[in-house]
Structure formats: structure tokens, C-alpha cells
Image (tube, rainbow, N blue to C red):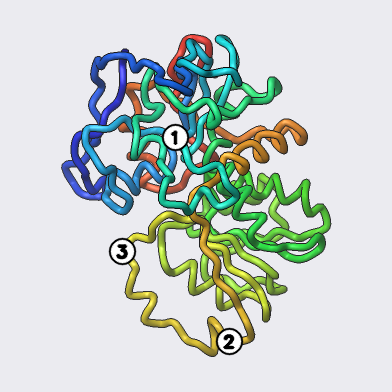
Amino acid sequence: MKAMRLHSLMDLGKAGAEEGPLRLEEVACPQPGPGEVLLQVQACGVCHTELDEIEGRTPPPRLPVIPGHEVIGRVVSLGPGCSRHQPGDRVGVGWIHCGCGGEQENIQPGFLATGRDVDGGYAEYMTVPEGYAVPVPATLSALEAAPLLCAGAVGYRALRLTGLRNGERLGLTGFGGSAHLVLAMARHLYPDSPIQVYARGEGSRQFAREQGADWVGETTAVPPEPPAAIIDTTPAWLPVLSALEVLRPGGRLVINAIRKEDTDHRELGRLSYHRHLWLEKEIKSVANVTVADIAGMLELAGTIALKPVTESYRLEEANRALRELRSGGVRGAKVLVISEEESFP
């Protein structure tokens, strides 16, 4: 089968990284073990977490490895003992490849990540434990469903962790693959809550306006009214301090990122207890997702007909998609289309 494999870590922001970190290779098709299913991959989203892997912020434990954790595929065959799925079923696989199955499996020692700890979906086929292959609503194409497996699921978890009540203001700092999905979910779950978006680039701010944000400003802008909660989806530190500064007393900042980059680490030196933390302001991080988050996200997406904004690429164009993601200004989500069943627009 064809696969894009990572052989060494690389800083995609440096000169000389134009060719990209992944190699298109012919590798043996995996075989499902006990309790596993084999999937023919239809589509796989390109996520900022892949950049975290490639650039060493959350490095794979072994190399080479096949990245990719926003996977939509068809079940091809079943390993011994499987009973949940049948060949032909369409399922999704997210960042959690397997865990303990409990409510906090996302932070337990047995957590394994798809595309980092085990081979993922930048390939024609992959295997996964049957309990972590989640049915996908028929109303969604593979292209539309793929971003929901991580950008959507972790956004769904982040939104729940805000503790927001209907009518309270929600802020989103950074506006790309995850945040535009959170905005759509929040509109459904909290219909009376105004939504504010803080974004560095004008392209992202215009995208937020098009998606229906009630107020849009630069990362450091001060909104007319303070939000009760803000979700940060950026890899930087400046948005964290800016968000804390504008939160209302007793507000909560939810940081939806695996790692923060060091490029603006100096911003932490400006942290002021009085300006940023006083009056019972709270910070909560998001760590991974559970399979229940993925199932809940897909169920919600089917209910509200959530249609992510996407850009499609062929498997062999994965390096280009990663470079464009690294450069910023993303409108929606980037998705590799891998099988012939999914066609390009």
C-alpha cells in the first residue's frame, strides 16, 4: 500500500524544509490482530498536532511512523473476536487509538495516539481496535467528517470544559480548523450566547465574520463586553495573556493545544497577577480526547448537519498541506483524499 511516512523530525519554519518531512513509500498492508479491524482509508484530516509531532513538541516514540489521526474509512476485514462492525461499515478514528475505556481515558497511562504511537491514516489502509472505530453519520461525506475526528472532537471537549451557560459570552482566540467548528456547535448548544473571535490575521478575521461571529478583533483587542469563557486554539503565548486580560471576573480560559511553541515564550514575562489572574480567573487545559468525545461530536454533527469548511489534497500532497498549515491563515480544515470513493470538488 502507499503511505506517507515520517523518518526524522524537522522544523518546518526553517529554510530547506520545502521538500517536507514525509516520504511517499510502498509499505506492507497491515493485518488486523485480535479485536482489531482493518480499514481502507477514504480521507484523513491534516491537523496542527502533526506539526507538533514533526517539530518535536510531542515526538513519536519510534520512527518511521505514518501520521494522521482524523481518519474516515471503510471496514475491510475483522480480526479474531470482533463483533461491533461488519465489512463495508464506515467509521472514524481520532487521536485516541486506544485507552482504558473510562471517563478519563484521555489522561491515563495506557493512552495511545493514532499517528504518533501507532501508524495512522496518511495511508491507504490502517488497523484500529474495534471499540475505537466510531460509526459516521450517513449525512456526512468522508471529506466533511474527517476534521470532526480531532478538530471537531477536541473542540467539542473544550466547549464542554468552559462550563458555559446559555446567554453567556464565549470568546475564541485563533480561528481555524477547530474554532470554526466550535462556533457552529456553540450556536446550536448556546443559541443566546454572543460569540467573540480574536485572530491575528485579517483573513482569519474575515473568515470568522463569514461564519457568523458577533464581534471580531485582533488577538490583543479589547471587546465591548468581557466574555465568560475563552477557548484558545493557538500555538502561541500572546493569545493566552490577552485572553486572561479580557476575561470577566470568575471567567475561564480553556487552552486547546498539546504544546505551546517557544517563538514568543518571552510574553510570559509580562504575566501580571493583578491584570491576568486576579478576581478568580481560571485556566484549564484540554488533554487529548476520549472515544466518548468523538462519538458525541459525530452525533451532534449529524443532528445539526455540521459541514466543516475544507480544502482537499491528494495523499502525495501531504507535505504541501503541512507547509500551508504551518504558515497560518487557514480557512477551515485541510483533508487528504485517499481512496477513489471520495472525489475532489
Give residue 345's quadrant in the image.
Answer: top right
User: In the image, what residue type sits under mark 2?
Assistant: Trp
Residue 9: give x, y in percent of width and height: 21, 44
Residue at x-position 36% and y-position 21%: 123
Residue at x-position 59% and y-position 12%: 86
Determine crowd level at label 2: few under 14, some 14-19, many 20+ residues with C-alpha closer than 10 A.
some
Residue 283: give x, y in percent of width and height: 55, 71
Q: Are the residues flagged by discs 1 and 3 in contact, CB closer than 8 Å?
A: no
Closest to the observer, 210 or 191: 191
Determine crowd level at label 3: few under 14, some 14-19, many 20+ residues with C-alpha closer than 10 A.
few
For residue 289, side relative to residue 63 (left or right): right
Residue 288: give x, y in percent of width and height: 49, 49
Q: Earlier in the sequence, mark 1 or mark 3?
A: 1
Q: CA distance from mark 1 to mark 2?
A: 38 Å
Residue hosting label 3 = 263
For residue 63, side relative to residue 160 (left or right): left
